[in-house]
Image (tube, rainbow, N blue to C red):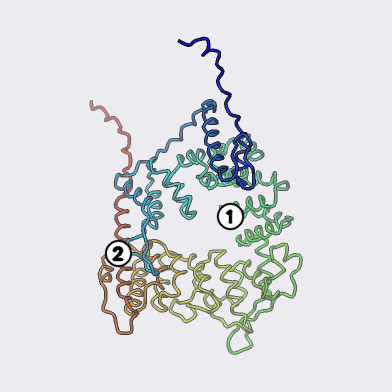
Amino acid sequence: MLTNAHRNTELPAPPPRPPWEDLVTAALLGTDRRALPPALGATGKEAPAALLDAAAAQTVRRRAGLRPAPAAPLPEPAADDPRPPLPPAARHRLATLLTDHPGTGGGGRRAAAPDLMELLPQWLSLANARGYGPPPELLPALLNAARGRTDLRPLALTFAGPRALWLARLNPDWKFALRATPGGGVALPPTDDPTRIRQLWEEGLFAERVALLTALRAQDARTARALLASTWPTERAEDRLMFLDSLRTGLSADDEPFLEQALTDRSRNVRSTAAELLSALPGSALAGRMATRAASCVAVDHTSDTPTLTVETPHECDAGMERDGVSPKPPAGRGERSWWLGQLVEAAPLATWRPRLGNRTPAQIVALPVADDWRGELHAAWCRAAVRQRDAAWSRALLGTPASPDAAGPGAVSLAERAKLLAALPAAERADWVAGFIAAHGLSEAFQLLGVCAVPWAGPLGRAVVDSLNIARDAGSYPWSFSGVMGLAERCLDPAEAVRLEALTATPDEPEDASPGAGGYWSEAFQRLVTTLRLRAAIHAELPPPPQPDPPAHPTPRQN
């Protein structure tokens, strides 16, 4: 029992506590530059320890005195994903692809084990084509992989579906998913609701407006153009450029009046984009004006023994040419008149040249000699026109035969331009051309061309690549100069080629003049290639087309 003496005894007053801000300041500046608060009663060598002790005690007090915040409302559930789930083997494969971090050999060597992360894009592409949905537990790992690889994002977000957007709204590390999705994942109003469409167009965020314009254009191009025209004068220049770029999809002659008005825009970039779009419409007035200008610059000279193309470059870049998208100022090191000529020929419809140049075919026109060293400039402009207009006949003529000496450069058409021209050809013809190129010129110059061929590579192309790699191995050089082609082969060769490649995995006998150890390195590279091809074959087997639902049963008619 407490006595009266005990009751009257006063407890000692707690020592004064220095403000938290003073402790933070002393910690940031250092105790040798900032004296501790007097309440701590420590100086010199004792100051750092006293500061840490005081900070620890204050931290406990601050945490203990924290009042609980009211509970936040639960987020809305994620939208349903109606796609069928992955088969168990494919689910396990995806988990392996997302968690594997293969090592690489030192000294420039590529390890024999396949790089599973490089197979992830192909896995996602196939899963999307088959229509499967993602396992929920693997979505965080998938979003983390896409966060680190921008090239993976379109495929990953398509496969992840609506739940990826739901997660991205809860985790700022995955905000890229909202930026990469049209409209930031916001549901757009129906295209037959003009009131809500107008409200979103006038009040929505820029990403939502772009998504709305794109969706509306796919359904009703006329209404989309009218919506864009209604606010066009008040839009920012950078926004006008983005809106104009959305017209590329489904571009038609109906867009010409709007684009013609955009030729007078106050922004040079907007004027240039409008001119580019109009030049892609062969029947547009701009295309006609460009055809007239370009045709006046190129003619056939019949006075010599061999018909020859002659070139007369423009003498000035007048206001009409500038309005139609011709840039008057050339880049450094480029002549003005040749710069203007290239832009005119590039923008003119390719149909201009046959009647202008003696009713010759594209191949015959390309074969004509060109006077005064204008061949390179003229052919380069025709290449850009063929790519822009996706003209297979002109692309074929400008490519020429793959075995010709000019095909490997540095002829009038560079390898980069040839790669773009190949994209206008059918996939089978493209593969045959590149196979012929490799057979004639080897793999050293073929990397850009292989990148535009359809996957998996057609049989002749795959065999040409393997044969050239085998020749390089027999020559005794190291495989590192072909690492880019090897990487493409791992992604693009038909998996059936693994059987044929098996014989190349053995270490060959090295000739006397071979690089030391080259045979072992080639064996390792082919082992990696074979293993990767077999993994790709397994992935295809694990992702079969999902079973189709049975049609509804109809009642059997009753028999009388």
Secondary structure of the residue carrying tag 1 is helix
- Binning the other alpha carbons within 10 Å of mark 1 as few (below 14), some (14 to 19) or many (20 upward) gives few
Instruction: State whether residue 394 appears in this view.
Output: no
Residue 133: percent from the left, percent from the top? Answer: 39, 43
Q: Is residue 136 above or below residue 339?
A: above
Secondary structure of the residue carrying tag 2 is helix
Instruction: State whether residue 383 appears in this view.
Output: yes
Q: Is residue 242 above or below residue 40?
A: below
* Left or right relative to 291: residue 99: left
Residue at far bottom of view = 305
Query: Disc 1 vs disc 2: which is toward the camera?
Result: 2
**Sequence-wise, which precedes: disc 1 or disc 2?**
1
**The C terminus, quarter of image:** top left
Of residues 504 and 355, the one drawn nearer to the viewer in this rendering: 504
Disc 1 from disc 2: Cα separation? 42 Å
Which residue is at 55% across, 37% downward? 55
Residue 67: percent from the left, percent from the top? Answer: 54, 26
Which residue is at 51% across, 32% downward? 60
Which residue is at 32% across, 34% downward? 552
Residue 435: percent from the left, percent from the top? Answer: 39, 72
- The amino acid type, in three-letter code, at marker 2 is Val
Q: Which residue is mark 2?
A: 530
- The amino acid type, in three-letter code, at marker 1 is Arg
Residue at far front of view = 5
Of residues 153 and 210, the one drawn nearer to the viewer in this rendering: 153
Q: Which residue is mark 1?
A: 248
